[in-house]
Amino acid sequence: MTDILRDEASNESRAVRLGLDGSPEAPVIRLVHPAPPQIAAEAILARAEALTAEDTRVLRIGVEAGPHTAARLLALGAARQIGTGVEILPGLLWQCAARWLPDSRPPFPELVTVTDGRRHPLRPGTLAGTVYTRDIPWLGRRLSFRTMTETGDVALFSAWMNDPRVAEVWQERGTLTEHQAYIARLQADPASLPLLGCLDDAPFGYFELYWARESRVGPLYEAGPYDRGWHVAIGDAAIRGRPYLSAWLPSLMHYLFLDEPRTQRIVGEPRADHAQQIRNLHGSGFATIATIDFPHKRAALVSLSREHFVRDRLWVPGAAVADAAPRPPAVPAA
């Protein structure tokens, strides 16, 4: 098999020949011909992603490549040393931020501050542009999340908020001017992040992310300093059903865990009477931990831990269902 990758240093495309041996539980990726370590490592990681994107059986992925390529995989945090070589573990690979975040940065230094009487870490904010990309093999499409900085983004959001189906849940009907002010307020607040979800660059939904400590839900449970929360509105009615849900929902959780490695829990607050949404969340690994009351709604407080997401490989469609095939251990014996 041959992977075509772009060498960022020379801006040229390079073909990388890889071989695949081993078993479904322990495949081995071989670098057939020498290639620059950065390019070779990228090709190996792309192949490892493909092997683990839809299959929970993979225990480990052996790598047969030169020492510089192996060192690159170790430096990225996608592999561990095993004897004189390296092997990729799915739980390491899928926490390798550089693989999915175009602007992968080191963790922001922790500096505690206070907002409205609540102590929380100072938040770094987010650079404009695409924040996450992932190829979805069962759709044959590329999913991405990006900031709302392009012409027409707020107008699209406004149209969605005035759609009766969305308005029934969101209760944010309004004019374009009102919605411009709404998004501007969120963009000015480092505790929140409004995003558009896209498939092949075409927007399909609105995602509103927040740091739980500073949010309205923060005082209602024991929020950790890096807990994140989210709201969603799927504006494109064509992007419905399990294949799409199993693409955008775990990808959003994946982004939140990658964006801040200290985030250990993600929470949500769907309406308590929104049975379908709660079923979807339970089927994706979330658990309801409380029922909470806001002035405008009674909500189910749902939670997903990083450990559960990584251990049970919840990026794989159907991995969270009760009768899913047993998973191998997250860290197999060396």
Image (cartoon, rainbow, N blue to C red):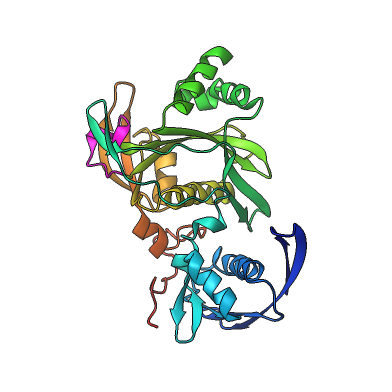
Residue occupying image coordinates x 45% and y 62%: 313
Residue at the outermost bottom position: 83
Residue 17 in the image, given as x and y percentages of width and height: 72, 76
Q: Does residue 163 appear left or right of residue 282 in this picture? A: right
Front-most of 235 and 185? 185
Residue 28 in the image, given as x and y percentages of width and height: 58, 81
Above-or-below relation of 43 to 306: below
Question: Does 45 appear in magenta?
Answer: no
Above-or-below relation of 255 to 129: below
Front-most of 14 and 136? 14
Residue occupying image coordinates x 56% and y 54%: 100
Residue occupying image coordinates x 38% and y 38%: 123
The part of the image, by quadrant, that contains residue 314 is bottom left
Residue 258 in the image, given as x and y percentages of width and height: 46, 52
Q: What quarter of the picture does the N terminus occupy?
A: bottom right
Residue 175 makes an appearance in the image: no
Residue 99 makes an appearance in the image: yes
Q: Which residues are magenta?
A: 213-225
Question: Does 219 appear in magenta?
Answer: yes
Q: Does residue 271 appear left or right of residue 164 in this picture? A: left
The part of the image, by quadrant, that contains residue 31 is bottom right
Front-most of 6 and 277? 6
Residue occupying image coordinates x 35% and y 52%: 262
Residue 19 in the image, given as x and y percentages of width and height: 67, 80
**Dominant secondary-structure state across the stretch colored magenta:** loop
